[in-house]
Amino acid sequence: MARKQLIRALPQQWPVTISQASNGQEALALLRQGAGQVMLLDLTMPVLDGYQTLAAIRDEGLSCKVIVVSGDVQEEAQRRVQQLGALAFIRKPAEPAILERTLSQLGLFDGQTQAPARDHSSQVPLKVNSRDALREVSNVAMGRAAALLAKVLGVFVQLPVPQVNIFEVSELHMTLTDAMHGERLSAVCQGFIGDGIAGEALLLFHDAEVADMARLLKWQPRSEVETAEMLLDLSSIIIGACLAGIAEQIDVRFSQGHPQSLGQHQSIERLIHLNQRRWKQTLAVEISYSLEAHHIHFDLLLLFTEDSIKRLTHKINYLMS
């Protein structure tokens, strides 16, 4: 999805041949073969991410001009990629005018050039399914949430590739139980609805890390009630920013309920037992945030209702058209 959007944003009169890679390792292999003079590089990728790819380009002395195009818009992310040799940073999804202006400023594109039709012979066919597209939409949204979180906590937030799956409620329970078995958790949920799409955001905090989180926030909760208030406030920031990022991309306005505590200091089994009637079949987006140099991470699940899947898929398919 990201590559399809980016290729469509390129200036049509830019006389280039395009090669594609789905991760940094594939990209480096192409560069070593001399396939790339200019690289448009994402940061959040499997196998080898953008930071590792930039470091390898620098360490191997590979000749390539790199522009980073990423949903991770943390100020520290932008500083780091430029330190690693990137010439520019563009936030996803890339606006054609911004991409063209950046290419022109770097001397990589002359808008006066009358070029023949672009050579697509080396491209991988752009087949994108709805689940992959939702993963990319979620990737952009989580980057915006991370940027806000980074400012609030004064840290660098490490981002994974989001996971997207359709679960029966029993499968969701099994997955959560396997992942969180033996840990004590506090959970916050927040409902959302808009344009025929509804669901709940579920944020799981690990109890062993809550005290460290309070220190980062310069908060000294004196009771369980104040600790719960801290987690509710943090949840509003993370969930609100992530939902806003999704809503903007699929052209929906979500109304959000107040965040609610589902339980504190519970096992995941107990949380599921207490709330099992809330969730049926669901389309689940899983995002695990972790804070660099701190043993702190939390897991965000966006659980879309079964009735919402058709409408959400329609919205996603419109993006791909």
Image: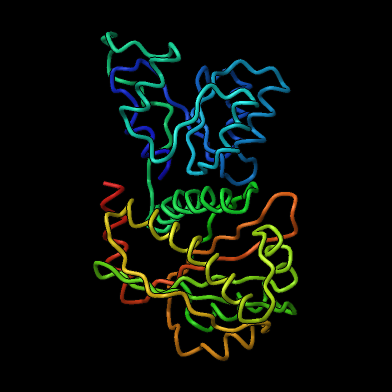
Whether residue 267 is situated above or below residue 259 in the rendered picture = below
On the image, which quarter does residue 219 sit in?
A: bottom right
On the image, which quarter does residue 54 sit in?
A: top right
Q: Residue at x 65, y 18 (%)?
A: 62
Q: Residue at x 47, y 49 (%)?
A: 144
Q: Residue at x 64, y 40 (%)?
A: 48
Q: What is the x, y in percent for residue 131?
A: 42, 58
Q: What is the x, y in percent for residue 316?
A: 32, 55
Whether residue 140 is situated above or below residue 209 in the rendered picture = above
Q: Residue at x 60, y 31 (%)?
A: 81
The answer to whether 15 appears left or right of 236 in the picture is: left
Q: Quadrant of the N terminus?
A: top left
Q: Is 223 in front, or is 143?
A: 223
Whether residue 59 is situated above or below residue 114 in the rendered picture = below
Q: Is 52 in front, or is 259?
A: 259
The answer to whether 26 appears left or right of 320 in the picture is: right
Q: Is 113 in front, or is 155?
A: 155
Number of residue marks: 0
